Image (cartoon, grey):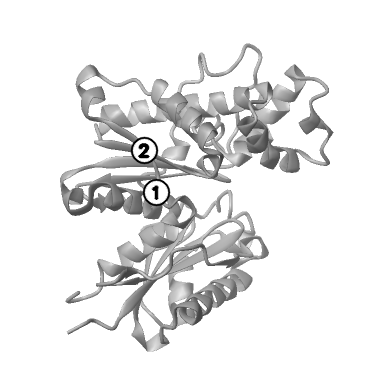
Amino acid sequence: MQKDWVVVGLDNGGSSNNATVLHPEKGFLVDRLVELPSRVQEGPDVAIEAIAQAFDLILQQTGIARDQVRAVGLDSPGPASAEGVVSSRGSTNFAHQGWYGFDFRGAVEKRLGLPVVYNNDGNAAALYAHHVCFGAEAARHSSVSVIVGTGLGAGVIAAGHIIKGAAGMAGELGHVHVPMQGLLEEGQPLPHCNCGFDGDAESVASLKGIENNLLPYWLTRFPGHELGKMASLAQAAKAVRSYGEKGDPMARKIFGQQAMAIGRLFTIAANFMDPTAYFLGGGVVEAAPAFREWFLAAVRENTYLREEQARVARFELVPDRDMAGARGAALAAMETVPGR
């Protein structure tokens, strides 16, 4: 008998909520982005309603009745606990003080009246990439993923399962310190991260890293550059990728430093985990094919593996890049449904 239930995946980001629906036999019922503004900068009350709207929209667009939904998978940027409680210090995307220590998962569960399974966005995308890459063999492999966005998300998968850690904050690779010697130019300031660290991976390899650290320095080395004439650094930072796609020398310097930081992060991962696959996702690969292949090659060039590791390691882009979070969240929810 055909099953008539589904799970919903909700990917909460700094600007948008993306949603999908997963059927246990038919697979994903959505083959495109379905998104609405996340409104997270306006605080939890507004953001929870925005998530509810995204949930209602995806059911409407797929023709699924609410009583067919068994569970909801939710992901958001970290750091947050395994139970979905946002860090007491907030985060890059959750700067509004109402988020500090907020029970995000519990609030969404109460609002929707359904069981909610929480993961951070890096974990969700990592889970999806892992399962697409390895399929039925997922439980035999491990992988590490980094997702370059406003911050630097990441996920660690061991034997097909997300590693969450004792407090749920495992896999926060963006806040791992990477060596800066040889990465920074002479006289380039040590980059500072919104989390309070100096010299972690996110301080370089993220949109905020470009805005706060890389672009201000490189504009002094390229006086008169068009990006320096924009209204704000935030606006200019968002435009750097388009310049990088066109081969602009300053933009390529910026992305070269980002690729080196990620490569060094993967090198650290290789020594504590020795994964089969290294995945790269996020806005930096939502680019022209030639640019994203250049960037992935630069990451691999800066990942130092032993000969034995290099023979078996895979470097790949996260598949279905902008849908990966919602799909991974749905996969995590599906695993919790009894008797599936």
Side of 179 relative to 46 (left or right): left
- Residues at marks 2 and 1, CA–CA distance in whole angstroms: 8 Å
- Amino acid type assigned to the residue bearing label 1 in the image: Pro
Residue 137: horizontal and vertical position, in percent?
Answer: 17, 49
The reply to whether residue 163 is visible in this rendering is no
Q: Are marks 2 and 1 in contact (CB under 8 Å)?
A: yes
Question: Which residue is more in the foreground, 289 or 38?
Answer: 289
Where does residue 102 sit, x and y in percent of width and height? 51, 64
Q: Is residue 68 above or below residue 158?
A: below
Dot 2: few (<14), some (14–19), or many (≥20) neighbours within 10 Å? some
Asked whether, in this view, residue 108 is left or right of residue 229, the answer is left
The residue to which callout 2 is attached is 316
> Percent x, y for residue 257?
55, 24
Front one among 261 and 96: 261
Percent across and percent down for residue 46 are 63, 72
Q: For the residue labelled by badge 2, is the local secondary structure a helix, a strand or a loop?
A: strand
In the rendered view, does 312 fall on the left or right side of 301?
A: left
